[in-house]
Amino acid sequence: MEELRQSMEHLKASHKSELVTAADRYVDEKAEIEKKLSGMIRAAVLTTLSRCDEELPNSSSISYPPHLALSALNVLINFINEKQTVAMSDTIVMAHATILAVNACASAAYTSSIQHFDGVNEQCHVIVQAIQEPLSSSRLDFKRLEVECKKLQEMMTALPLQSDIDKDVLGNELENEMARMSEAIRAAVEQIEKIQLKARNNNDGIRLEVNEAILGCCQQLMAAIMALVSSSRELQAEIVAAGRGGASPHEFYKRNHQWTEGLLSAAKAVGVAARVLVESADGVVTGNGKFEQLIVAAQEIAASTAQLFVSSRVKADKDSEKFAALSVSSKSVNQCTAQVVAAVKSGQTTLNEQDNLNFSHLTLHEAKKEEMESQVRMLELEQKLVMERKKLAELRKQHYHMAQLAVAEQNGGSGERDSSFEFIG
């Protein structure tokens, strides 16, 4: 009995020790899992914020009411104020609220007043950076984010409302904006020529060919846009002359203020889009930008000119020669946009292929290593090809066998053989 008691005591002590060890191991493993999970959350949030920062310029492609944007921004500010300490799990909600707020505010600023768009858009970039920095350093201190959000709140509150538009100055404002738009397009053409000259001096070979093709298409697009703008102005003059009667052009603009506001908004959009196109083209040529950004910029300026076309034709006589010329110009812009997109995609493919086959930068050791790895991949692919051929042969045999059974069933088990299913080895 004594031995049994001692044995039980020993087992209890052993089990107790194992429980303590298991508990410690559980704590360590839990901490490790939580650490990995936090890292994954941080990486996902940072990736999403980075994508948001890249896509902010595209916020001009949609309309958004300023009061709803301000509401989304207030949600973010209230969330920051309520959280004395921010856990990693809270960052998902905070990042989501930030992305909603900055996209809404940028779009609302563009919708309300294009003059205010650049300032609001830049502040939105600052806010995205203000949340990225503490996440990257794992120091979840969002005081700067709160300060920057309140700055954006002040900017959004200061946006002009629709009721603030002075109908008496619409005519002058439209004429001035059309002039600014034309100047922006001319400046864009000159800038593209400078970019092209810089590309010729700094590049050669395939890279130069790709840049020449892309910039050439961009120049054609800008030329088509200049033609569309010219046609639009001629059509507007015809519409005003036909509709104003004895009144002045400014009186006509005032009386038809909604049409005038549509033209004004479209003209502003074209001017902004022209600048974005130049910046994107320069980024692609210098290697600091993405091909996709240039595609989006080309599509954006095409959309802006389409808005100008639609706004111009609202009051146009459908039998007017100037309206027909505007329609031709609009189609030309669409064709040139498609050519830009095609040139960018083709250039991207060409450069990727060149990078994959360019080994001039490798050292002797690196070249030998690449050669061996290439041989290994080739052998692996050859082995896969052999296996796939065997698989195909077996599938053909099985298909032949099943087809013969089906024929036998159709013939009532007579055993007659259909030569159309004869297996070819």
Image (spheres, rainbow, N blue to C red):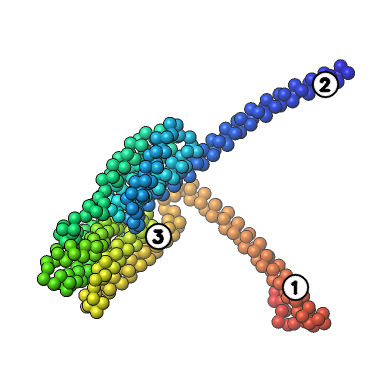
102 lies above or below 424: above
Instruction: Tell me residue 42's x, y (percent).
Output: 47, 40
Earlier sequence position, callout 2 versus callout 3: 2
Question: Mark 2 — residue?
Answer: 7
Residue matched to label 1: 401
Marks 2 and 3, how far apart at CA? 76 Å
Query: Residue 17 is drawn in which quadrant?
Result: top right
Q: Are marks 1 and 2 in contact (CB under 8 Å)?
A: no
Marks 2 and 3 close (CB-CB < 8 Å): no
Q: Earlier in the sequence, mark 1 or mark 3?
A: 3
Quarter location, residue 256: bottom left
Residue shown at 47% from the left, 42% from the top: 92
| Left or right of 119 in this view: 346 | right
Which residue bears the numbered disc 3? Answer: 348
**Residue 71, above or below 229:** above
Q: Residue 420: x and y, percent?
A: 71, 82
x 25%, y 59%: residue:
265
Residue at position x 60%, y 56% from top?
380
Could you classify mark 2 by the number of other residues whose Cα lies within 10 Å: few (under 14), some (14-19), or many (20 or more)? few
**Horizontal and vertical percent for residue 411?**
78, 82
For label 1, the SS is helix
Q: Answer left or right for 351 relative to 369.
A: left
Sequence-wise, which precedes: disc 1 or disc 2?
2
Disc 1 versus disc 2: nearer the observer: 2
Image spot of residue 141 (x, y percent):
40, 33
Report the residue at 18% width, 64% height from top: 255
In-front residue for pair 331/98: 98
Q: Is residue 47 visible?
A: yes
